[in-house]
Image (tube, rainbow, N blue to C red):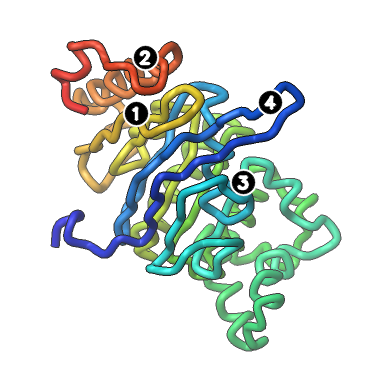
Amino acid sequence: MTKHLKKVRLRVEKLQKIYQTGSGPFEAVRSLTFDLHDGEFACLVGPSGSGKTTLLKCIAGLMGATSGSVVLDGQPVNGPAKGMAVVFQEYGRSLFPWMTVEANVGLPLKTGGVPKAERAERIAEALEAVGLGAAGGKYPWQLSGGMQQRVAIARAVASRPSVLLMDEPFAAVDAQTRADLEDLVRRIWQEHNMTILFVTHDIDESVYLAERVLVLSSSPTVIQNDIAIDLPRERDQLLTRSDARFGELRAEVYERVQFAKTNVTGQSEPARLVEAGA
């Protein structure tokens, strides 16, 4: 079954977000539309200030949109949705330091009314999935930054979402930890058949992780480009990044992001980019 025949998991249609400011209305997101199909891994990239986090919060139901719609598995998203989980960049703030790792992972399950026995099973499975099976009794402050982010990922995995949203989750860790976490997320994606929308400012990371890279325009934000990443499904930090095709895709995404920095929304792209394929 091809990607385009798979079920649409997430549909964002004509999404608009306008902030009211002291100097008047500010349009951050303008009539933005895209679909994610079942089991897809897509990355969102764009210039600084292009509204990536605003867009993700609107999709997650954490911030109300001015107009347009977000639909998850056929149901409109008007607030935090049961089938969607979010992992933020500031993992330290999302974990409660006075609660054990197990308690942190299980908190959404507990508040959601999941029975105790099932809760314990799902916590154990999630911690094993992120390589922290023996850390359940520890506290977040006893763990490294990379391990704390694994706890945050485990908490999201434990809720068994159909869509996982990730907002620059590896921006605050060192390069080696980042590489390990990238491979961890790809493994979880494959093993759990999740649909993932991953926001990043790192072009190399977007090409390494995703099947699609959605390039945002400068504000007011629209989807400027939707680029298919035709790399092998199995990826390796050294082999994939040294592949000639990886370099070509990286250059394409980079050039489009550079164009987005100075592009007025709706302006035509240079001929060399159009000829390369949008």
Type of amino acid under label 3: Phe
Tell me the residue at 20%/43% (across/down). Answer: 232
Query: Which of labels 3 and 4 is toward the front?
Result: 4
Type of amino acid under label 1: Gln
Question: Where residue 183 appears, x then y in whole percent?
Answer: 42, 46
Q: On the image, which quarter does residue 131 sit in?
A: bottom right
Question: Where residue 68 appears, x then y in whole percent?
Answer: 46, 49
Q: CA distance from mark 2 to mark 1?
A: 10 Å
Q: Which residue is mark 3?
A: 88
Nearer to me, 163 or 24: 24
Q: Earlier in the sequence, mark 3 or mark 4?
A: 4
Q: Which type of secondary structure does the marked residue at label 1 adopt?
A: strand
Callout 2: few (<14), some (14-19), or many (20+) C-alpha neighbours within 10 Å? Answer: some
Q: CA distance from mark 3 to mark 4?
A: 30 Å
Q: Which mark is residue 224?
A: 1
Q: Which residue is mark 2?
A: 259
Callout 3: few (<14), some (14-19), or many (20+) C-alpha neighbours within 10 Å? Answer: many
Type of amino acid under label 2: Phe
Q: Are marks 2 and 4 in contact (CB under 8 Å)?
A: no
Q: Which residue is mark 4?
A: 24
